[in-house]
Image: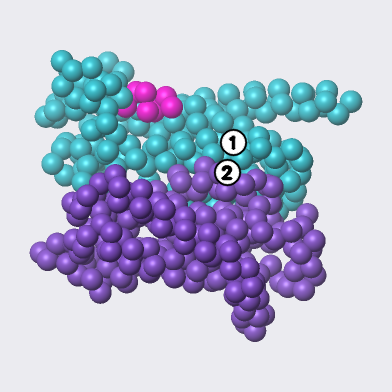
Chain colours: A purple, B cyan
Amino acid sequence: MGKIFSLIKKDFLLELRQQYSFYGLLLYGASTLFLLFMALESPEANVWNGLFWITQLFICINAVAKAFLQESKGRMLYYYTLNHPTSFILAKLLYNGILMMVMSAISLFFFLLLMGNPIDKMGAFIGMVFLGGFSLSLVFGFLAAIAARAQQNAAVMAILGFPVIIPQVILLMRLSSTAFSPLLNIPTPTILLLLALDALVILLAVILFPFLWKD
Amino acid sequence: MLGPVPRLPLLQETIRNLYFHVCMWFAMMILFTISVVHAVRYLRTLQPKFDRSSRLYAGTGILFGLLGYGTGAIWASFTWADPNIPLIDSFSTIARDPKLIGAAVALLVYAAYMVLRDSINDIDKRARISAVYNIFAFVLLFPAIWILPRILPSLHPGNEGNPALDVKNDISSSMRIVFYPAVLGWTLLGVWITQLKIRLQKLEDKKFES
């Protein structure tokens, strides 16, 4: 447990010292949004919802890709001598989850600012955004580990990830579409299903990562 | 094949597609499952023969998936689509059906698996990484294929509002006599094709080594 925290702390320190990557991510999100802002004016609720999640997907790929791709071969070897693979992958996934939740919150703010506000249940929608950001980052976090081991770039991650993430994105879009209308209730089974999928991804990552890790 | 079939509204004689379309999906799922089992066995033993089987079963699975998609599309062009409009024009509405989404996801996942395999040069690394992806993707595929169609509305037989192709209630016993052996037959055909490919691959690997 202590090891996980110190690994997460190390990632935060790296982020603080190399701030360019975080600002790069912000700029990526901002310019994507500005492009959407130019393309459409005040979209309808379902278009808004679709665009929001697609933007989250692309931000997530860029945010998570560097988690593994930035680690050099020597540094991986150093971690290998110090840590158990389980604590390493858990630390990475948690750190990515937190990073992606921050990014989701920021992009939600800019979406509301530029694309108008069609949301009826704001509190619930913010909760869904955090849940969604976390779910996306878990799947892509593990795929980033695969892509990094295959010495590939973020493009391969997208190829591997998009088919796998489709069910989760469909669930998220259906869930969040209920926040736009005052008449619809939030379906609890869908939330539970998403949480169960998150648990499944974490479990798979813990089981499978040791095989990726050794050379 | 030509035996008596129940007259269900909307389906009528097209119900005979059950012998091909449904069995091909069964065969695809079984072949992908065999592929994953081999991937797990590879990670446990690190013997290259399991990796070879895993890859070739996935390849045959993709073939059966494409055949299932094709037979489904021909069927849909008679039942869902307006026969006066070419199928191409109504495809975007048909492909929205959750069962088709699940099927498309399965095919995309295994296509990505093939791309990932071919992008790695080192043989051991390729085997290990693609086995890991195979297992990861397969386990996440379950929600796509079994959960999503149950929570999204669908036109596909097997749901409310349309004649349900519930194997127990809706197809007659004379159809079941053909259906069960057909599932077995298509699956074994897939296994046989893969066995031939595995033997061929084994010989090629031997030639490459010597």
- Nearest the eye: A43 or B178: A43
- Left or right, B193 with reference to B175: right
Q: Residue at x 42, y 41 (%)?
A: B105
In the displayed structure, B59 sits above or below A2; it is above
Regarding residue B46, the answer to whether it shows in the image is yes
Q: Chain of mark 1?
A: B
Marks 1/2 same chain: no
The tally of labels here is: 2
The residue under label 1 is B115
**Quadrant (top left, top right, bottom left, bottom right) of the N terminus of chain B:** top left
Q: Quadrant of residue A192?
A: bottom left
In the displayed structure, B77 sits above or below B125; it is above
x then y, percent, for residue A109: 33, 67
Residue B71 in magenta stretch: yes
Q: Residue at x 68, y 55 (%)?
A: A212
Q: Amino acid at mark 1?
A: Val
Q: Quadrant of residue A87?
A: bottom right
Which range is magenta? B66-72
Residue that protrudes farthest toward the right in the picture? B210
Instruction: Tell me which secondary structure the magenta stretch mostly adopts.
Output: helix
Q: Residue at x 31, y 60 (%)?
A: A111
The residue under label 2 is A156
x then y, percent, for residue B203: 77, 24
